[in-house]
Amino acid sequence: MKTILVIEDNEDIRDNVSEILMLAHYSVLTAVNGMEGIEIAQKNKPDLIICDIMMPGVDGYGVLHMLHKDPETQAIPFIFLTSKSERSDFRVAMEMGADDYITKPFAGNELLNAIGSRFRKTDIIKKNLSADLNGFNELMSTLSGNTGSLEDLTKNSNINEYKKRQSIYKEGAHPHYLYFIVKGKVKTYKTHEDGKDLVMDLYNEGDFFGYLSLLEGSSYKESAETMEETELALIPRKDFEQLINSNPSTAQKFIGLLAKNLVEKKEQLLGIAYNTLRKKVAEALVSLDRKYHDNKKEPYQIDISRDDLATIAGTATESLIRTLSDFKSEQLIDIKSGKVIITDHRKLEHLIR
């Protein structure tokens, strides 16, 4: 059972809120003023705090300030409950780090919906998400207040259509959007001074990309290009930043996800630098199959140009073609109309162990 601390100097309102919460099966703590609320919060570490703003002595702003200074209480979700409804009051509350703001009078379901939404967001932040795009998408879905499909997050965004091998953005450009793939496939890559490309990431339908530069506030460190005809939802930068800045714990979670991704990129680069040619090509084929093979009942046909496949493997196109020919002779793969089909997953995966 989750515990909620209610800090409210008006006895009738305090009792009313407490009754609503207990009927919703929450454990309730109460405080009659700001100083008492701070002491109870520091001692009991409630799961959420509901606090009035206008109180004698330490007001709600003071309570929030003091609790945010304490590492043990700074991450507790905080909802202001007040009769003040001026826009400037909303702005002050949110800039100080409040998670929500409910004005009096309010309906019981309004209060419970705000609490439920905050707990869902807190739970996903605490969850041990995977370090790949699935983890990122799950986090984005929950933080957007959406427990359904990701399309709801992009419903107000422009949908742009791109042709095969069309540039989305170039290395060095400044980001203006977070991209969501409605349909198609995208690769990000870096170009060496000798003109050779190194594929950094592959993205599929339902993936977000381009978020690293938005988080850093920097220019793109890589270029992005479609691998086939693609539809992208463009989410404005300001909307993404508003989402990220809504909760300090959210930003911390993104930092953790990005740190894990950096470790994976380091391993990828080490593999390209030191793995044998056969292992590089095998890893590229297996990774593409894992990424894009949705229907496991049917063999997946890797429909990608030899040049792109070579950049993913980190080798020359000529070397890639020779290795594919060897794999076909060994009956590890088949090639039909230029498309690669893995015929022996076990042996091919054994090459990369």
Image (cartoon, grey):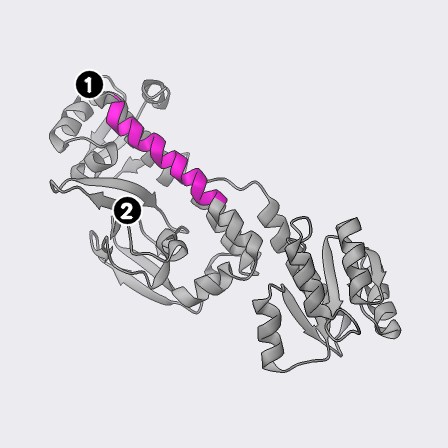
The mark lying in front, picked from 2 and 1, is: 2
Q: Nearer the viewer, residue 109 or 217?
A: 217
Query: Amino acid type of disc 1?
Result: Ser
Q: Per the image, is 77 magenta? A: no
Residue 187, numbered circle: 2
Q: Position of residue 319 (x, y in %)?
A: 14, 26
Circle 1 — which element? helix
Do labels 2 and 1 touch, CB within 8 Å? no
Using the rendered image of the protein, determine whether residue 15 is visible from the camera's viewpoint: yes
Residue 329, numbered circle: 1
Q: Residue at x 38, y 57 (%)?
A: 214
Q: Nearer the viewer, residue 123 or 91?
A: 91
Q: Nearer the viewer, residue 300 or 241?
A: 241
- Is 104 on the left-hand or right-hand side of 20? left
| Quarter of the figure with the C terminus | top left
Residue 52, numbered circle: none
Q: Quadrant of residue 179?
A: bottom left
Circle 2 — which element? strand
Q: Position of residue 225 (x, y in %)?
A: 24, 51
Q: How many marks?
A: 2
Most extreme residue toward the front is 57
Give neighbour class at mark 2: few <14, some 14-19, many 20+ (Cα, 10 Å): many
Give neighbour class at mark 1: few <14, some 14-19, many 20+ (Cα, 10 Å): few
Instruction: Return the disc, 2 or 1, that comes first in the chain's sequence.
Output: 2
Q: Residue at x 53, y 42 (%)?
A: 129
Query: Amino acid type of disc 2?
Result: Lys
| Distance of label 2 from label 1 (alpha carbons) | 29 Å
Magenta span? 256-275
Q: Position of residue 222 (x, y in %)?
A: 26, 49
Using the rendered image of the protein, determine whether residue 26 is visible from the camera's viewpoint: no
- Is 119 on the left-hand or right-hand side of 312? right
Q: Residue at x 86, y 65 (%)?
A: 19
